[in-house]
Amino acid sequence: MIMPSNVPKSVSTMIHWALSTVYIIGLTQVAYLVLQAAFEIRLHAIKEYGRVIHEFDPYFNYRATEYLYEHGWTKFATWFDYMVWYPLGRPVGTTIYPGMQVTSVLIKNYILKDWSVNDICVFVPAWFGVIATLMTGLMAYECSVGIHLKPTRTANKQTEKDQDDQTNENENENSNDISDMTANDTDKVQPFGSILNQIPLINVVYSRIIVPVINWLLNLINTLTGSSWGFGTPSPTTTHKVNTTLGSTPALECGVCAAAIMSIIPAHIMRSVGGGYDNESIAMTAMSTTFYCWIRSLRGNTKPNYLWSILTGLAYFYMVAAWGGYVFVLNLIGVHASLLVLLGRYSTKLHRAYTLFYLVGTSLAIQVPVVGWTPLKSLEQLGPLVAFLAFQLIELCQIIKRYKKLNTVQTWKLRIMVFACAGLVALGIGYVLAQTGYFGPISSRVRGLFVKHTKTGNPLVDSVAEHQPATAGAYFQYLHNVCYIAPVGFVLVALFQFHDASSFLLVYGSAAYFFSHKMVRLILLTAPIASVLGGLTLGHFLGYMTGAIFGVTSRPSIATILLMAEDEQHDTTNGSTTANGEQPKEDISVKKKKDTTTTKTKKSKKNSTKKSEEATTTAVATPLLDTTNENKNSDNFVARLLRLAVCVYGIMEGVPYVQEFYKTSQDMAVGMSHPSIIIKGTTRDGRDVTVDDYREAYWWLRDNTPEDSRIMAWWDYGYQITAIANRTTIADGNTWNHEHIALLGRALTSPEKEGHRIARHLADYILLWTGGGGDDLAKSPHMRRIANSVYRHMCPGDPTCRSYGFSQMGPTPTMAASMLYKLHSHKTQTGVEADRNRFRMVYQSRHGKVRIFKVLSVSKESKEWVANPANLDCDAEGSWFCPGHYPPALEKILAEKQDFAQLEDFNRGTAGGDTDYQKQYMENLNNPEKANQAAAREAAEAAAAQRKKKIQKLDAEAIHEINKNWEDSVYTSMMWEIASKNDLPGLRTMLQEEPAVVHMRSADGRGIMWWAHEYGREKLVNILKKLGVSETLKDAKGLTPLDITTL
């Protein structure tokens, strides 16, 4: 800050200290308001719909939380739930990530004892959204603050004895350069550098051409204008000066800006709205905390941060307990640590940080039942294990090097020998373990991240909409204007603020973009990194502006305040300032001693230092700008005023974009706060309508069906049915058993009779979503494909089941004949009616969104057999792990299945036909036009075969029984339409499906024979006579068909 020359230094310091304190308090208040906004924006759903759980998975999480609260951890860990995945059941305790449930119960037991479990579950996403916002801000702060929070001015005043004692230690133990391990005193150099200085060959061009040219230009500008314009003065490329301005980086501004973005960015809100009680709602907090602790553990260049390394492992453990996405966190940290080694930035600090993180994190992760030993077996997690072992080998080499005082060549020979021996041993062990099936395959979902969507080979995975690749529109939708400023922050870190900690942002940003581009749901992962990078951009802009007011070297920051307090204390205590304000001259004896020490140091590093300087491969990045000389050429008043004017203009131009981002985020928050289970809309006459069909249907099941009722529905709705209706379901969103879901898909998409033969042994009721859009009929092609992956006769020769679906003429024959279509379109489509002998509709929701059918002729024998505890298959006597079995009546159907072998499952032998099936599946997806043509040919052949099929003629007794019933139906309407249009092909199709239709009579006693005579259809009359349709029967008025004939 510019002060008149006659103001005493102490007064100037006090004024600056006061202004800095006010400024920092102001930023703290802004941070508080940001966190408050983060909470408020996530409450739209609660304010609009009340304390309601949303979506599908959250209902299972809520039910599991209630069970944990009521029964305790021991019973929860051994909970085998027979109300799900009937008749097999599910061992919930060993197949769930329990972090969210444990967290909620702890809140209930120790913090909010008066709250209900439901209310806590509703608010957890909003609470943890605020914490994630805070941790994201801390990430940005840590990556901007440099190596030290406290300036290094005091560090430079250590005694010459300390310098002599530490020289060799720094050279040998705490070095960063893996090529010779001799870089020293790295804590005393500028904290930030450029990644260009870390890459071989490029670093030569960077340090010898780019930096000198830019520095020359800045020197020229400085000379011509008398101002550095806030960019600092150039620094010689061969001199690494002590940085006394670490506090001048706009770390606080960057942290606050990053938190402000994270608080309202839609990519994060979509998984953290009130009521969205899903794993990701707390997993994002756990992930951000893990990343912050990891970055914090890398602060500084020499001294290991043991506490923060351990905290990283603990935060990672919480992430493991919360969400299966922990694999991303583990691999990301492993890749970052490995990258630092490859860039020549290995150090004792890095070794201790990664080692403690991996040991603590993994040892705790394997305690989570659903995880077990997978960190040491799964191919998805072996990379970080290899990195851990490599770190130990590198450190071993360093210990041997220090002990034997090896030179560079000898050190590299040692490393090659150690890694070669270790590699041979690892290959041998890996080969032996691979033969035993020890290693687990890469899951379909992970594999899907490296192949194009719908090409994982698993139709169950391919059926999920969230697995679609992200588009540019999706990024803008969920990141909005942040997707434009985040790349600026990425470049800023890469070129100007690169060091051990901040380099993590480059790895995180690259990985998040790659994986989110492959799978749209993973845009969630981009929220923290986009916020941090965007915050860095905005924070540095604000820092540039405040620098125009206070000066670059004395910008308000915690470090600056500490520095001023330290200087004041030093001046007061030691009298280090002369009367005229000048610094006293350095004692000659001390200077001489320093020179002697420097000479010794140079001699001891003659070989290694010279080589590293010539190749510019030192671990410390050559700074592009040096702000340490800012005080030598302070900007004049005019220069600072111009800088401030430019910044104000930039703010005025940017405000509309900020307002647009805020408004869009609010609108998106409102849109994403609508629970899918409740729909609000407006009618044509302007009335507001709440569609609560789904919950009402579940309540109907709860209140109107026996407690042991089994509900057949597609797996999407299983969680809601179990949690709200408290009824047994066939499958749910856990999707752990591909073959069982295939059996469900077969029952729903098979012809009505065959579907009933399966359903009567598994279910008492069938529930369908029938409201249009993404209802069950729209999902049924996916059901058919999943079924066909196990029951290959469903779509012979066509793994993608192109023959099942909709054509321009309507549903294809296979869809029209399916049980799902008959139930879905029961009496809503012309000619479609469920078999009254097999199903009876017992409930239809108010707005037609849900239909429930009672299954007739349910097999009591099968139901009792499944309920008999003697038929459970316990893994040991008295064990809690006792899966159920299918009833014997389904053995014939189950014998037709072929267990699905995923492409990535190399431990399984290739079953017959699997290779051909996968090949055809992928070919059809790659060439859908060819697949459609093949499906059309098959449909034509099937139609031709159907035409050749003989029409069954009913016997006299059956005809007599049919003629007793007079009622208007879809079938009688179709018969009238056929007679009026003389649609003989349509009649043939109907007769092949249902021969009884020609004998059905409407409420007035008339049938197709009356209408054929009435319209003069002679050929039709002759066909009906051959089928046994009478011309002498009388209608309600006593008239026969012959009485009204026009023939």
Image (tube, grey):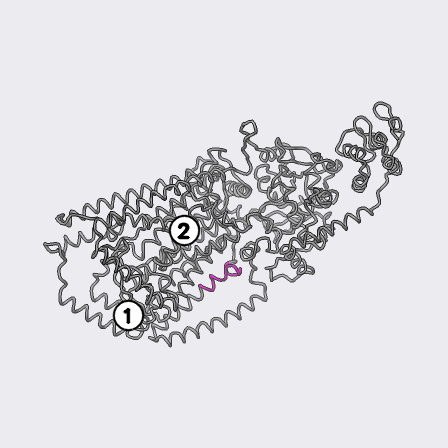
Compared across the picture, whether 798 is left or right of 304 comes to right
What element does badge 1 sit on? helix
User: Where does label 1 land, which residue?
Assistant: 168
State which quadrant residue 211 falls in: bottom left
Residue 870 in sight here = no
Of 552 and 578, nearer the camera is 552
Tell me which segment is drawn in magenta. Answer: 375-387
Marks 1,2: beta carbons within 8 A: no
Q: CA distance from mark 1 to mark 2?
A: 42 Å
User: Where does label 2 land, which residue?
Assistant: 486
Q: Position of residue 679 (x, y in %)?
A: 55, 35
Instruction: For marks 1 and 2, give the one nearer the viewer.
Output: 2
Q: Position of residue 194 (x, y in %)?
A: 35, 61
Of 429 and 650, nearer the camera is 650
Circle 2 residues within 10 Å: few <14, some 14–19, many ≥20: many
Q: Position of residue 142 (x, y in %)?
A: 34, 53
Q: Position of residue 434 (x, y in %)?
A: 57, 66
Q: Is residue 385 magenta?
A: yes
Compared across the picture, whether 754 is left or right of 206 comes to right
Q: Is residue 584 magenta?
A: no
The residue located at (37%, 76%) in the rendering is: 409
Amino acid type at image mark 1: Asn
Main SS class of the magenta portion in the image: helix
Judged from this view, the residue extending furthest toward the front is 224
Judged from this view, the residue extending furthest toward the top is 1037
